[in-house]
Amino acid sequence: GVPVEVVPGITSGIAAPAYAGIPLTHRDHSSSITFVTGHETAGKYRPSVNWEAIAKGSETIVIYMGVHNLPYIIQQLTQAGQSPETPVALIRWGTRPDQEELIATLETIVQKVEETGFEAPAIAVIGSVVNFKSRLNL
């Protein structure tokens, strides 16, 4: 009985990186993006993300709800050939005044999450475009 209006918006996988000053594409660094969930539901019709295909097929990876599974995701991506030096940005509460960001590499992000107490919910952006944050963040 409560009147509701649905207003189409921009997905957090695009909005949060943009607000943080991270372009998802760049003509010299990334011409492809993959958006993927980092936390699947039990009993899903196809219960496993093909991290190897994603690691090899996309220059920028945006992961929704991946903080809790980050150690597993990082392991899968590096086993599939992603460099441990690949930049990673975690963005919590994207576009809000209390937005939080954590920047590291595939090799160091899990340790930084533990050290800082960074928590879900967050969007993860993986790829060289993360390096643009320092230049484009206003």
Image (tube, rainbow, N blue to C red):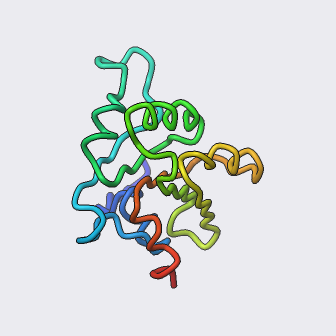
Query: Measured from the top left, where is residue 121 in percent x and y?
Result: 57, 48
Give the residue drawn at x 34%, y 54%: 60
* In the depicted structure, whether residue 94 falls above or below residue 46: below
Query: Measured from the top left, where is residue 108 in percent x and y?
Result: 63, 49
* In the depicted structure, whether residue 130 falls above or below residue 55: below
Q: Nearer the viewer, residue 79 or 26?
A: 79
Compared across the picture, whether 23 is left or right of 83 comes to left
Residue at the farthest top position:
43
Q: Nearer the viewer, residue 37 or 58?
A: 58
Compared across the picture, whether 127 is left or right of 46 comes to right
Give the residue drawn at x 33%, y 64%: 24
Residue 100 lies in what quarter of the image?
Answer: bottom right
* In the depicted structure, whether residue 115 falls above or below residue 20: above
Residue at the farthest bottom position:
138
Query: Measured from the top left, where is residue 83 in percent x and y?
Result: 45, 46
Give the residue drawn at x 29%, y 48%: 34
Q: Nearer the viewer, residue 93 or 53?
A: 53
Query: Measured from the top left, where is residue 89 in percent x and y?
Result: 52, 58
Q: How many numbered tags mark residues here?
A: 0
Give the residue drawn at x 53%, y 47%: 106
Residue 67 lies in what quarter of the image?
Answer: top right
Q: Nearer the viewer, residue 4 or 120?
A: 120
